[in-house]
Image (cartoon, rainbow, N blue to C red):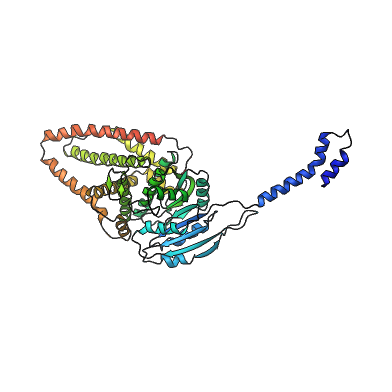
């Protein structure tokens, strides 16, 4: 019999004793019991999902140490970290191997909790014909007991709370198959005028792409391999539905886009994180940027184009590809307006038929305002981002470069010539090859031929071409400007990219 029972026995015979007095007498015992019960419940172990990080590494000697340090400084350590070195000729393995073994978080644990632990494994799988795809699948085979797979490129550094944010978001909804981090590029170490221009352009390009996806209900068309977390349940569903032995397949130039489509088709959601951030490796030369962008564009076209090509089936109406179609249509419009304007301007000046109108300043002014707004939507913007947008000329130069990548990608695809774009990109990053000059050569030759032809035409035909060409350009430019104005005044709902 407890102390409370004794008190109740002593007081019960008293018929004048009231119910509230009984409760008062019992309260100390109840409060003690509640405190003990809560303490026992708090002491019970809570389930913590297993997060396994996979880092495919190909010649990443310059960056692999920074990547591993960023993972080991996380507020939520991955439970396992696997570096899968493949096809590398540099010191990637030996540098990564210095981090191998059990590791403990350097962060001070919260009160009442223990310091986090993880273990780093470094694997060198040697020559691997499937390249990054093979490395990812090898990593997947090692982490079958994990709940979530975190894919991180060998040149991507994560913000200190990135893993914590990604895990919280994907664990909050079982319908989510994968979440991509918000990507940008660290430009603090960039040297050289051209490199700074290219990195600023890529930062703006990432920012615009991220914002588009955020404003579409945070639906992410591509779970980029740079830093994305995947539900193992979703990856296994993809394998079962597509009769694959592995989640990633080399049917596409852009393995992350194809997997994203398959995850969506399997009934899962593909999202972009609202807060988790990562800095990816940027391309600091025109040659390397061309190799990367042509591969990306080519892979996207391959997935968009209808029909069966080998093991790849085009999916033009897949919901994840709607943004891709919009991007391609927008780029085609940008190329049309710029090329036609230059041609008509040169033609009009050659016969003294050009009349300036201030109305032509409206489209570039709207474009500048839109670029400035994109710059101010960046969470970690700096003066170079704002200057890149406000001066107009850097952004225009970068747009012409992107136009070259776009044309090269479409030309390669329509030529139906089998090309290893992974090898082409690797060669470009090493500083080899001159394919990036092809659009410039074609443009120069085309203008030269058109210029010669123009001067052979009678004055009446020249006037007729200008009479027809300018109105067509007016209409397309007006439509393009209206679209830009719509983006300029679109609510951003507080998102920061």
Q: Does residue 181 appear anywhere in the picture?
A: no
- Residue 417 higher or lower than 212, as above or below: below
User: Residue 52's x, y, as percent?
Assistant: 49, 56
User: Residue 25's x, y, as percent?
Assistant: 82, 40
Residue nearest the viewer, comparing 290 with 456: 290
Residue 371, by quadrant, is top left
- Residue 473 higher or lower than 278, as above or below: above
Q: Does residue 148 appear anywhere in the picture?
A: yes
Q: Residue at x 28, y 56 (%)?
A: 420
Could you tell whether 219 is left or right of 479 in the image?
Answer: right
Please state, as top left, top right, bottom left or bottom right, where the C terminus lies in the image. Answer: top left
Total count of labels: 0
Residue nearest the viewer, comparing 431 with 56: 56
Residue 450, by quadrant, is top left
Q: Which residue is drawn at 39% across and 64% down?
A: 125
Residue nearest the viewer, comparing 143 with 424: 143
User: Residue 233's x, y, as percent?
Assistant: 47, 49
User: Residue 147's x, y, as percent?
Assistant: 50, 52
Q: Residue at x 21, y 51 (%)?
A: 441
Residue nearest the viewer, comparing 136 with 327: 136
């Amino acid at each position: 019999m407890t102390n409370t029972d004794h008190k109740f026995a002593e007081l019960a015979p008293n018929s004048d004793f009231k119910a509230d007095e009984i409760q008062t007498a019992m309260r100390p015992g109840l409060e003690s019991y509640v405190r003990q019960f809560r303490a026992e419940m708090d002491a019970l172990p809570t389930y913590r999902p297993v997060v396994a990080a996979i880092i495919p590494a190909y010649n990443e000697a310059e960056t692999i140490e920074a990547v591993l340090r960023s993972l080991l400084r996380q507020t939520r350590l991955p439970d396992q970290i696997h570096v899968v070195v493949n096809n590398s000729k540099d010191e990637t393995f030996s540098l990564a191997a210095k981090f191998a073994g059990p590791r403990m978080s350097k962060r001070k644990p919260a009160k009442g909790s223990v310091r986090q632990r993880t273990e780093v494994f470094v694997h060198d799988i040697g020559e691997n014909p499937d390249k990054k795809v093979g490395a990812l699948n090898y990593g997947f085979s090692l982490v079958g007991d994990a709940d979530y797979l975190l894919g991180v490129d060998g040149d991507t550094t994560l913000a200190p709370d990135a893993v914590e944010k990604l895990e919280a978001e994907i664990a909050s909804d079982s319908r989510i198959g994968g979440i991509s981090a918000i990507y940008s590029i660290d430009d603090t170490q960039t040297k050289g005028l051209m490199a700074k221009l290219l990195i600023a352009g890529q930062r703006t390009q990432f920012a615009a792409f991220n914002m588009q996806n955020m404003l579409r209900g945070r639906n992410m068309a591509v779970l980029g391999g740079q830093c994305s977390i995947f539900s193992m349940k979703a990856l296994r569903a993809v394998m079962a539905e597509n009769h694959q032995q592995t989640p990633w397949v080399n049917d596409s130039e852009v393995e992350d886009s194809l997997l994203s489509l398959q995850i969506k088709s399997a009934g899962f959601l593909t999202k972009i994180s609202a807060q988790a951030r990562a800095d990816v490796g940027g391309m600091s030369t025109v040659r390397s940027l061309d190799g990367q962008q042509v591969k990306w564009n080519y892979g996207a076209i391959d997935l968009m184009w209808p029909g069966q090509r080998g093991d790849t089936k085009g999916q033009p109406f897949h919901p994840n590809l709607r943004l891709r179609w919009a991007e391609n249509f927008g780029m085609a419009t940008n190329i049309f307006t710029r090329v036609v304007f230059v041609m008509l301007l040169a033609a009009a000046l050659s016969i003294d038929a050009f009349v300036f109108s201030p109305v032509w300043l409206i489209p570039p002014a709207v474009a500048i305002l839109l670029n400035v707004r994109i710059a101010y939507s960046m969470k970690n913007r700096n003066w170079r981002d704002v200057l890149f947008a406000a001066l107009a000329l850097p952004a225009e130069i970068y747009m012409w470069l992107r136009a070259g990548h776009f044309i090269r990608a479409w030309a390669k695809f329509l030529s139906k010539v089998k090309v290893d774009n992974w090898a082409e990109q690797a060669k470009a990053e090493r500083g080899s090859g001159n394919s990036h000059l092809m659009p410039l050569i074609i443009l120069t030759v085309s203008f030269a031929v058109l210029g010669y032809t123009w001067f052979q035409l009678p004055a009446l035909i020249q006037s007729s071409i200008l009479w027809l060409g300018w109105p067509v350009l007016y209409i397309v430019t007006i439509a393009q400007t209206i679209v830009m104005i719509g983006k300029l005044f679109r609510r951003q709902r507080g998102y920061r990219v």
